Amino acid sequence: MHMITKKGVKVSNLTKHIGGFGVGCSPEGLIALGMVRFQQSKYSDHYTEINSGKYTLKLFTDGRSINTFYPEFTGLR
């Protein structure tokens, strides 16, 4: 847990239990991957291969909207 203090007074706790980001992917591409994964979450697997890399598509929702989405690198093919 990280804490921001201002002159000894606790201002805010900065925590995030889950999350990540894709390096080299455009924001539009990452949003598109997340939307496809969200729409097909009941019917498709959670793994993909992009440019010889294997990824697990991590998706966390509240049932109606995306809270966090990121591709997790799992190795090369």
Image (cartoon, rainbow, N blue to C red):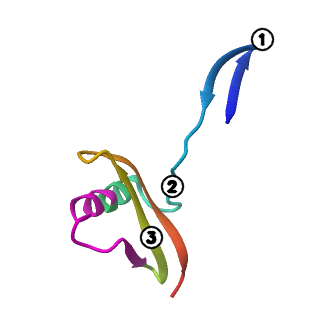
Q: In the visual, does 65 lie left or right of 72?
A: left
Determine the residue located farthest toward the right in the rendered image: 8
Q: Is residue 1 magenta?
A: no
Looking at the rendering, the stretch of residues picked out in magenta corresponds to 34-49
Locate the N terminus by quadrant: top right
Q: Earlier in the sequence, mark 1 or mark 3?
A: 1
Label 3 and label 2: CA atoms lie apart by 13 Å
Q: Which residue is mark 1?
A: 7
Q: Which residue is mark 2?
A: 21
Q: What residue is rendered at 47% in x and 78% in y?
A: 54
Q: Earlier in the sequence, mark 3 or mark 2?
A: 2
Q: Residues within 10 Å of mark 3 (few under 14, many from 20)?
A: some
Label 1 and label 3: CA atoms lie apart by 43 Å
Q: Amino acid at mark 3?
A: Thr
Q: What residue is rendered at 69% in x and 17% in y?
A: 10
Check if mark 2's residue and mark 1's residue have beta carbons within 8 Å.
no
Q: Residues within 10 Å of mark 1 (few under 14, many from 20)?
A: few
Determine the residue located farthest toward the bottom in the rendered image: 77
From the viewer's side, name the closer residue of 11 and 35.
11
